[in-house]
Image: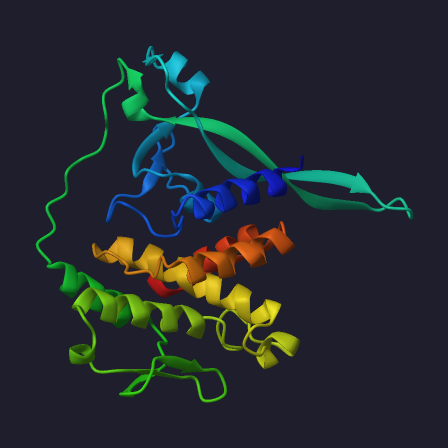
Amino acid sequence: MQVNEIVTSKIIEKLEAGTIPWQKPWIGSPAINYVSRKPYTGINVLLLDKGGEFATFKQIQSLGGTLKKGSKASMVVFYKQNRVEDEEGKTKTIPILRYYNVFHLSDSEGIPSKLELIQNTDSPIEQAEQIITNYKDCPEITEDPGQAWYMPSTDKIGIPNKKQFKGIEEYYSTLYHEICHSTGHINRLKRFTGEDAKASFGSESYSKEELIAEIGSAILCCHAGIEKTIDNSASYIQSWLKVLKNDKNFIIQASSKAQKAVDYILQ
């Protein structure tokens, strides 16, 4: 089984168990590698079920630590650049998806955590608002009592008044979804070009763009320190299961583009 198929099957397994992998049980605590201190991004955000520090078996051994009995590894993926020659003898680079296993630091013994408890003086709502403020070329946001939307042709966002939502977290979760859509504009990350610009509801392009915005919104909510509200109804889960089962590269591509959207917004 290829790596993309393994990744997709893991995401499908989570959905079939009633867990939405882009809805994280933690807020404000990204998953990072213990040694490099670099955060895991893209599809790895969905594959890892915990925030905090992770390390490979070799890293744990080299640090003088041991694994607790019964510890289970988590899969993370990366692209390895392979150089090959074409029929004309020219060398080109092809990215190949590979994976390795990591363990959460809580599954090890003898290795102290390096995480520092940062006291943030801003409230979650101030942090949530700051993300929008820092989005350097954010489209005009207008109030629409009927629905939330992003219109590529006018490069504008519409969203109901805060008071129309059940909670302020739901307002920002919805707004983040729309601003993630806006990163696809031709003057930003250029996702809305060619056929993608004409994508209709229910099409493959539309589904992928919706998942990009959903994952991007979830990541932004983590940065803001608020919980993203996601519909975990059977119909919602079944709709994504159908899409993922039809395309084994879908979730990896959507996660990658969602990460680029978040990076663009956060600069």
Residue nearest the viewer, comparing 91 with 149: 149
Question: Does residue 41 appear anywhere in the picture?
Answer: no
Give residue 229's position: percent from left, percent from top: 28, 61
Residue 182 location, quadrant: bottom left
The residue depicted at 38 percent of the width and 17 percent of the height is 60
Q: Nearer the viewer, residue 216 or 202?
A: 202
Q: At which x and y percent is residue 15? A: 45, 48
Asked if 110 appears above or below 25 in the picture, the reply is above
- Comparing 31 with 214, the one in front is 214
Q: Is residue 46 left or right of residue 201?
A: left
* Residue depicted at 44% across the width and 72% down the height: 181
Q: Is residue 148 above or below residue 94?
A: below
The residue located at (44%, 62%) in the rendering is 235
Q: Residue at the left extreme?
A: 121
| Residue extending furthest toward the right | 88
**Residue 119 image point, x, y percent:** 10, 46
* Colour style of the rendered protein structure: rainbow
In percent of width and height, residue 1 lies at 67, 35
Quadrant where the C terminus is found in the figure: bottom left
How many discs appear?
0
Left or right: 84, with 164 as reference point: right
Q: For this rendering, which residue is in front, 118 or 77?
A: 77
Q: Residue at x 58, y 38 (%)?
A: 6
Q: Is residue 129 visible?
A: yes
